[in-house]
């Protein structure tokens, strides 16, 4: 495995698509904030409300689930992807990882990328667990852990077999493992996508068909 620095690692990851993309260097134009602010109720509520309006939904929990899923998918993509590319996880500290959401485009940025701890520490302990705790008053924690587990599995599918040795130990964490049925691999909770105007159920949904059908 080549000896890459964190910036080069992120540059290479971007080839996989927007979920693997993190800007680096001077902060570009836009309203950028540390990702720690996503735990602030006022910031959270504004983001969820704008997402609900864009999606055409009236239920706060549906929009919150969508926002969380997208964010978790981006975190896992960067964390697992950087380990695949460089053998180490890029640091995703909630003060150094910045976010911006304009015109429905959620973007991430790190001024001076560096490598940090293992993916479990960077994503589960440093980002997702405190975010789930901060959002528990608007959406059930079990649903959000289901989103986290489903997003991790999706990241592994994009990166293919190279990611298996990284994702498998992560699913041993009870917070993620308990969110999936060990036999079917389906989630134990629904992400609520069926309650959006486009409706339908996801491939790992516990419902075989939309309850609204």
Image: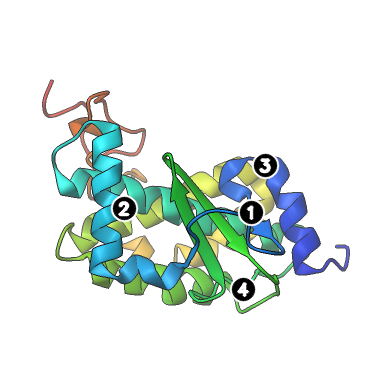
x then y, percent, for residue 51: 30, 43
55 relative position to 172: left or right? left
Bin the neighbour count of mark 3 within 10 Å (Cα to Cα): few under 14, some 14-19, many 20 and up.
Answer: few
Bin the neighbour count of mark 4 within 10 Å (Cα to Cα): few under 14, some 14-19, many 20 and up.
Answer: many
Q: Answer yes or no: do the residues labelled 4 and 1 have beta carbons within 8 Å?
A: no
Residue farthest to the left? Answer: 212
Along the polypeptide, which appears first: circle 2 or circle 1? 2
Residue located 59% across and 54% down the image: 29
86 relative position to 150: left or right? right
Residue located 19% across and 35% down the image: 57
SS of the residue under disc 3: helix
Along the polypeptide, which appears first: circle 2 or circle 4? 2
SS of the residue under disc 4: loop
58 relative position to 185: left or right? left
Read off the residue under disc 3: 16
Bin the neighbour count of mark 2 within 10 Å (Cα to Cα): few under 14, some 14-19, many 20 and up.
Answer: some
Closer mark to the observer between disc 3 and disc 2 = 2
Q: Answer yes or no: do the residues labelled 3 and 4 have beta carbons within 8 Å?
A: no
Read off the residue under disc 4: 91
SS of the residue under disc 1: helix
Residue located 60% across and 60% down the image: 109
Alpha carbons under labels 4 and 1: distance apart: 18 Å
Bin the neighbour count of mark 1 within 10 Å (Cα to Cα): few under 14, some 14-19, many 20 and up.
Answer: some
């Amino acid at each position: 495995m080549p000896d890459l620095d964190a910036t080069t690692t992120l540059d290479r990851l971007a080839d996989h698509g927007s979920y693997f993309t993190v800007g680096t260097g001077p902060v570009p134009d836009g309203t950028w904030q540390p990702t720690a602010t996503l735990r602030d109720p006022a910031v959270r509520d504004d983001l969820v409300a704008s997402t609900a309006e864009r999606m055409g939904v009236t239920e706060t929990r549906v929009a919150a689930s969508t926002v969380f899923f997208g964010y978790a998918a981006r975190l896992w993509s960067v964390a697992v992807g950087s380990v695949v590319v460089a053998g180490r996880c890029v640091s995703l500290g909630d003060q150094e990882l910045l976010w911006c959401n304009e015109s429905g485009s959620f973007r991430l940025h790190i001024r001076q990328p560096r490598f940090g701890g293992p993916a479990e520490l960077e994503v589960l302990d440093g980002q997702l667990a405190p975010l789930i705790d901060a959002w528990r008053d608007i959406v059930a924690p079990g649903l959000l852990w289901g989103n986290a587990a489903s997003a991790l599995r999706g990241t592994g599918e994009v990166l293919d077999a190279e990611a298996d040795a990284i994702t498998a130990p992560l699913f041993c964490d009870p917070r993620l493992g308990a969110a999936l049925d060990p036999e079917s691999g389906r989630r134990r909770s629904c992400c609520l996508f069926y309650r959006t105007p486009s409706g339908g159920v996801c491939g790992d949904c516990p419902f075989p068909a939309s309850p609204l059908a």
